[in-house]
Amino acid sequence: MNLKLRKAVLLAAVAPLLLLTGCASTPAVEISDPWVRASEYSDHVGGMTGVFFEVKNNTSETITLVGGSAEVAELVEIHEIVLSGGEMVMQPKEGGISIEPGQTHVLEMGGDHVMLINLNQAIVAGDVLSVTLDFEGAEDVTLTDLVAKPSDGGDETYHNEDTGH
Ligand SMILES: [Cu+2]
């Protein structure tokens, strides 16, 4: 066996180990505590609701959450809450949500969130959904077993006519 071939065999033997190690370690994009809100705005076809979670960037580059997709909704948008005319209103967040290496971004009621718009089905408490998050700088992440639950407050951000939805 020449040296070149020996090296190739060695790599072939080691590569699967590296893959296994990769599976066992922390994901590049780490999502914690995901949930979707069940409310009077989500309990009918054509409704909408928000998805909330914490996202940590474990890569060495900045990543950006730019959008998403879901079977339950026609549109998935990244939203922010801004103060406009003395009212808290939500609007699409231009450029998405950028997260620096090692940083965590919290999407929560009253702040940044992922919006499911024009629902294809009613979402009520206890429903389990799947939503895919699209990232620039990282692989897309699909949240499965996303459970809908009710939550008080935050309604003021959900029925503003200025946002068009
Ligand atoms: Cu929104």
Image (cartoon, grey):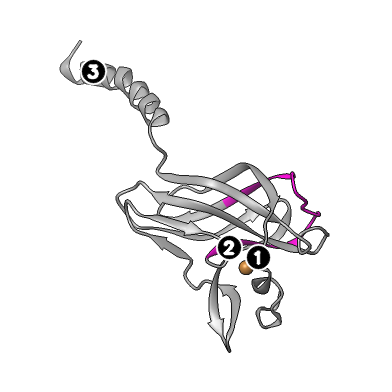
Describe residue 155's horizontal placement relative to residue 53 as left or right.
Answer: right
- Image quarter for residue 81? bottom right
Residue toward you, 134 or 43: 43
3D distance between C-alphas at marks 2 and 3: 58 Å
Tell me if 3 is positioned left or right of 138 in this view: left
Residues packed near mark 1 inside 10 Å, few (<14), some (14 to 19) or many (20 plus): few
Q: Which of marks 2 and 3 is in front?
A: 2
Question: Please, which residue is most extreme toward the bottom here?
Answer: 85
- Label 3 or label 1, whichever comes before in sequence order: 3
In this figure, what is the number of numbered marks?
A: 3
* Mark 2, secondary structure of its residue: loop
Q: Residue at x 76, y 60 (%)?
A: 42
- Residue 120 position within the rendered picture, expressed as x and y whole percent measured from the top left: 79, 56
Question: x%, y% of residue 37?
Answer: 68, 55
Give the amino acid at mark 1: Gly
Image quarter of the N terminus: top left
